[in-house]
Image (cartoon, grey):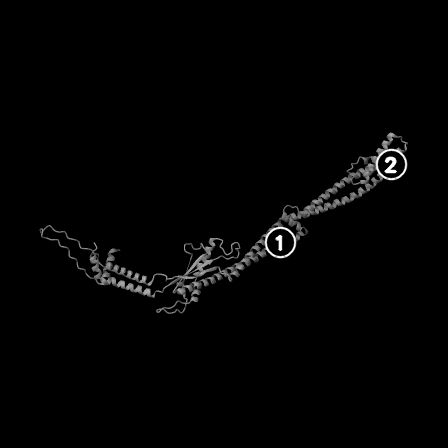
Amino acid sequence: MIDPPKILDILLAHRYRWIVPTVVITIAAVGYALLKPSMWSASQTLVLREVSIGGLDRPGAFARPEDMKTAQETIQTIARSREVVARTLEEIGPPPTGWLSSAPNDWPNADNISAYRNYISVGSPSGTEFGTTEIFSIHVEAESPERAALFATTLCDQLDQQLEQVRDHKAKSVVAELEESERLAAEVLNRSTEKISKLEAEVGRDLAELRILNESGSGDGNLRQQFVQVEAELRGARDQQQSNDQLLSLLEAAAANPQELLATPNSLLNSQPALRRLKDGLVDAQLRTAQLQGTRTADHPAVRSALESEKEVRDHLFKEIAIAVRGLKAERSVLKQRIEGYARQRDQISGRMVDLAEVRASYGNLENEVRQRSEKLTEVQRDLADARSSLAAAHATSLLTRVGLPEVSDYPVGPSRKIIVAAGVFGGLVCGLGILFLTTHPAQLTEPAQTAPTAVGGANEAVEDAAPQSIRKLSFTDALIHLANRASHANPR
């Protein structure tokens, strides 16, 4: 069992073993607390927006949360980049020198840039995940409150400039790429336009008909209407020629026998109104003569007058038949020429329609090709206009909006000097006590075992307590040797 008085005796007997480490570590802590520079923190709240070019539905707003997170991660990388930190340190200058330090000659060097990069962090507002809101903060640390505020302001200025350069380089790259795409699209469109122009020149006067045929797809164009009209005219001329041929045959037969004319249908005589009237007059004269002969004698003046009228009508009819025959023969010749003209016109229109049908598919493909490439060129030109607008806006606008001024902390960052000294005292004391108890034999920390009373010697023999063993003092070197031996016994390997 551990004996507290013996522990106290050991502390007093070997006081230098724990006092010296405690004093040394305390002095080191005091020196660190005195020499350690006080760092102050400052934070600048920023609002990020999206580029408005090309997003007219919601100008300045991110379409997706992933885009906003990507943009903030890009800003985080740029803010801690070596170039931005170096330019910021060049502008704010070196920190104030202390009584043990001198002003650096090559400010900022690689060590300064690496150290200050660790003092920069980009985070989101408290309670939110980084990249989920348009608001974020840039946190910096510096040697004084004024320097921390200046560091935050200058860093935001350099971040704006670097973002402007990044947007400028990106926009220039996109513009160059789109200009090349525009050139290639224009060349392809020109080749397609030359092909369709050559085909249209071959089509000639039927170009409008080909375009109508290609656009409507029904085939009911002007050329088709002309073909139908000519076909109808040709059919009518042939029908008229057939009727005239039949009428001519009847009239030639009636020239020898007028009774044949009376059996001719009136539909055939529609083209010969005078002949039709004479036919009707002859029929009327014959009826009147028959009526008179039925009531009077053949020598009756009325009957003789009727017979004379009938004869006169028949004579006129013979003359008119001869005239009609000559007219029908002349009209047959005219109709023949008209039929031949209609047939040639129909064949020409049919040939033109066949030619258009042959080139319709290739013309439709070329027209679709030209339309698609024209739309592609229009799309590239629209993107190129947006890219050029972005290039112009990269120098005129900023994507970052600052919310107020930098907020500087009220107290330095990290533990104060008092806490550092107290921690040094406590650590030194723990280290000294550890060294003390590691270099002390365990038997010196426990009570000696009590001896049992003997039955020999009678009632007068008393029980005596074991006398405490004397504590053997060891030097610091002997204590270290003793500690090494104990360690070797504890680890036999």
Tag 1 and tag 2, C-beta contact below 8 Å = no
| Mark 1 crowd level (few <14, some 14–19, many ≥20, 10 Å Cα) | some
Q: Is residue 168 left or right of residue 117?
A: right
Residue 73 location (% of width, % of height): 44, 57
Q: What kind of residue is marked 1?
A: Lys
Residue 110 in sight from this viewpoint: no
Q: Is residue 331 left or right of residue 302?
A: left
Residue 322 location (% of width, % of height): 83, 40
Residue denoted by label 2: 309
Which residue is pictured at 62% across the width and 54% down the height?
195
Mark 1 or mark 2: whose residue is earlier in sequence: 1
Which residue is pictured at 20% across the width and 58% down the height?
5
Residue 404 location (% of width, % of height): 45, 61
Image quadrant holding the C terminus, namely bottom left
Q: CA distance from mark 1 to mark 2?
A: 82 Å
Q: Nearest to the eye among marks 1 and 2: give it.
A: 2
Q: Nearer the viewer, residue 37 or 346?
A: 37
In terms of secondary structure, where does tag 2 sit? helix
Residue 99 location, quadrant: bottom left
Residue denoted by label 1: 195
Count of marks, rendered view: 2
Q: Nearer the viewer, residue 143 or 249?
A: 143
Q: What kind of residue is marked 2?
A: Ser
Residue 275 location, quadrant: top right
Residue 266 location (% of width, % of height): 78, 37
